[in-house]
Image (cartoon, rainbow, N blue to C red):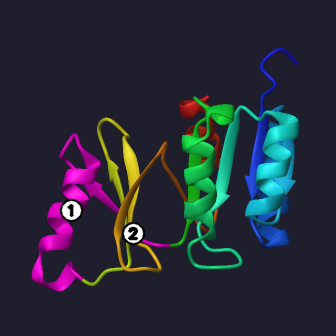
Amino acid sequence: MENTKRILIVDDDIDVLTVIKTILENEGHQIITAKDKNEAIEKAKAEKPNLAICDVMMTTHYEGFELAEVLTNDEEFKGMPVLMQTSIEVFSSRNDDAMTFARQYREKVNSKDMEVLLVENAKTLKAGVDYRTEDGKIKWLPVDGFIRKPVKAKTLIEAVNRVL
């Protein structure tokens, strides 16, 4: 199939992997699966996927972010879109710069101690993760969007088609 794309799906939940794999294979894509960050990096280097879909929480609370950071910043994967799948609430921002919105939101009295903020601009679809690292620093990680868990086939297909 001419439009076949290689998609790396990373999740420690075999049921989630199976559902997403089935949906995307039915759309004609070639699916590569991994259960953790290390396996995902190894497979990404070998298979050169066109897209990665990463779970947020796997072995640790930060593993999905760490993986997304490698896939986003490593020259070997330059330009490969990364979608994050999560059950964490995603904040919608009208601010074109999602990071600015996240930082301003974090400054609100009740939000300073939030560990993770997922932000997506509804119009531009620019998105990112603003999170507190294990050493207490606040870090911004741009991503190409979020897929809500539990995964809905239509939403998943729309997100994948948008970034590919």
Q: Position of residue 69 (x, y in %)?
A: 55, 52
Q: Name the residue under label 1.
A: 103
Q: Callout 1, which amino acid?
A: Arg
How crowded pointer 1 is (Cα within 10 Å; few <14, some 14-19, many 20+) is rated as some
> Is 138 within the magenta?
no
Which image quadrant for residue 151? bottom right
Q: Tell me if 94 is positioned left or right of 79 in this view.
A: left
Instruction: Tell me if residue 62 comes above or below residue 94 in the rendering.
Output: below
Instruction: Tell me if residue 104 comes above or below residue 98 in the rendering.
Output: below
Q: Point out which mark residue 131 bears.
A: 2
Residue at left offset 55%, top offset 66%: 86
Residue 148 seen in this snapshot: no
User: From mark 1 to mark 2, how far is it between C-alphas?
Assistant: 10 Å
Quarter of the image containing the C terminus?
top right
Residue at left offset 44%, top offset 74%: 133
Q: Position of residue 121 (x, y in %)?
A: 30, 46
Secondary structure of residue under mark 2: strand
Judging depth in this view, the residue of 127 and 77 nearest the camera is: 77
Q: Position of residue 29 (x, y in %)?
A: 82, 34
Upstream in sequence: badge 1 or badge 2: 1
Q: Point out which mark residue 124 bears.
A: none
Q: Callout 2, which amino acid?
A: Tyr
Instruction: Tell me if residue 51 comes above or below residue 143 in the rendering.
Output: above
> Is 91 within the magenta?
yes
Residue at left offset 25%, top offset 61%: 102
Q: State which region is magenta.
A: 88-112
